[in-house]
Image: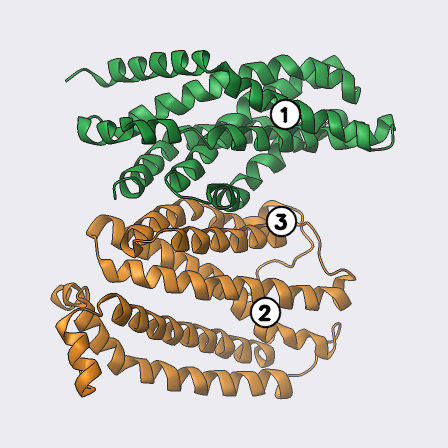
Amino acid sequence: MWRLLYQLASPMAFYRLSGRIAPWFATSAMLTLVVGMIWGLVFAPPDYQQGDAFRIIYVHVPCAFLSMSLYAFMGFLSLLLLIWRIKIAGVMLRMCAELGASMAFLALVTGSIWGKPMWGTWWIWDARLTSELILLFLYGAILATANAYQNKEQGDRVVAILALVGLVDLPIIHYSVYWWNTLHQGATLSVFAKPKMDTSMLYPLLLTLLGFGLYSAWAVLLKTRNEVLLRERRKGWVKQLVERGKP
Amino acid sequence: MSSLFTIFKRQLTREFWLNLRQVKFILNSCLFFLMITVFFPLTMPPDVVLLRTIAPGLVWIAMLLAMFLSSERLFQQDHDDGVIEQWLVSGYPVSVLVSAKILMHWLVNLIPMLILCPFLAILFTLTPHETALLMLSLVLGTPTLLYLCALAAAFSTGLQQKGVLMALILMPLTIPVMIFGSGALIAVMQHLPPLGYLLLLLAMSIAAVGLLPFAIAGVIRIGLVD
């Protein structure tokens, strides 16, 4: 099994393998997203307090969850890059940063839209929102630093260090609802406790969470494949791919 | 090979004399600090309550900006002179050298600001107790700020548009220090105990001083070797 992982570190092997599994991610993402979204937006019962406006949860929660899990994944990729010097991890790091930044932005925007009718305000400086805003700025800093270096491999390694330094923000966001009195609600879903949400609303949420996750995996794979082709464009296998259509 | 402690002491001495011989840089950051803190009362309505309300945040923001300004040149001179290359090939851990450099930079920059604090107290009508607490919170919180500024400087040394990149990196990382730093003074102004804030500032500083030199050394090694 370890041999497979080491082989994955080669750009060509990664390109081949991701080419085979990306369609699976795409179809499963499409299925779960379509089913989850239609179930959540149309068939789930309206909330007794919020009415139909609660349905934005099916976009807001997956975006927020993904912005944090993509950052955690970036932390893992940073370790792979810095300790084991796996260059693919560096490429994937950049692409995760791009996707994670858009997820964090969407989480803040959809949360803002949800907050206006429910809390009466577009924004409030409470712990959860502030720390998610910090995460968005962190993503921005990572993207800006990555693009500031002409030598892309050097940029990857520098960005890996920055990502690791910013990793400390993740527990702060997650636990901010416990540590501070905050307007944002606490955790409804957890691994060990019974969910505080009714199953008729819970199942579409889990489906959209899974759907967004699969979509992110697919998007990151596709972007990484593209970047790998760009960086390895002088290698023989890329030339072969361009000429003959198969790697 | 000399011991690590000898290297640390030697670097501290070097940085001390370098800073002292180029006093104009320290004066620059002090003037910048003063400019921000003096211009706010000048440009706002002369309401004592208003000024006391904005004083905590304002002093910390001015401190952050002054440190940001002074750390832009933190590694620049050594990079241009080739000293950093010598660090990298010397065989000594770069984290120790970097830590000594930033520590001396902190001491040399902070002490003038602390001397200016009573002057600020007069401007913003702070009591002596509050001033003392402001100075203590600055002493506890500025190591984190300066080490983060040094990290940002390490990222941008050798690049062209460094100011923008530094500010962008610094923005998310310094938010916790700023919140707790100004929170300590706000708490004292409301006659609440500031101990929690001060301890958190101290904890963040210890974490920054202990762990960030390794990150900074890593960035220097990767970023400044073309």
Q: CA distance from mark 2 to mark 1?
A: 41 Å
Residue A78 makes an appearance in the image: yes
Q: Chain of mark 3?
A: A
Task: State the image quarter where residue A58 is shown.
Answer: bottom right
Q: Chain of mark 2?
A: A
Tell me if residue A208 comes above or below residue B216 in the rendering. below
Q: Which chain is orange?
A: A
Quarter of the N terminus of chain B within the rendering: top left
- Residue at 54%, 44% in the rendered image: B171
- Residue at 49%, 26% in the rendered image: B143
Q: CA distance from mark 2 to mark 3?
A: 17 Å
**Residues at discs 2 and 3 in contact (Cβ within 8 Å):** no
* Residue identifier under label 1: B33
Mark 3, residues whose alpha carbon is within 10 Å: few (<14), some, or many (≥20)? many
Q: Nearer the viewer, residue A196 or B5?
A: B5
Q: Nearer the viewer, residue A60 or B123?
A: B123
Q: Colour of chain B?
A: green
Q: Amino acid at mark 1?
A: Phe
Identify the mark at residue A60; answer none if there is no mark: 2
Q: Amino acid at mark 3?
A: Ala
Identify the mark at residue A127; answer none if there is no mark: 3
Which element is circle 3 on? helix
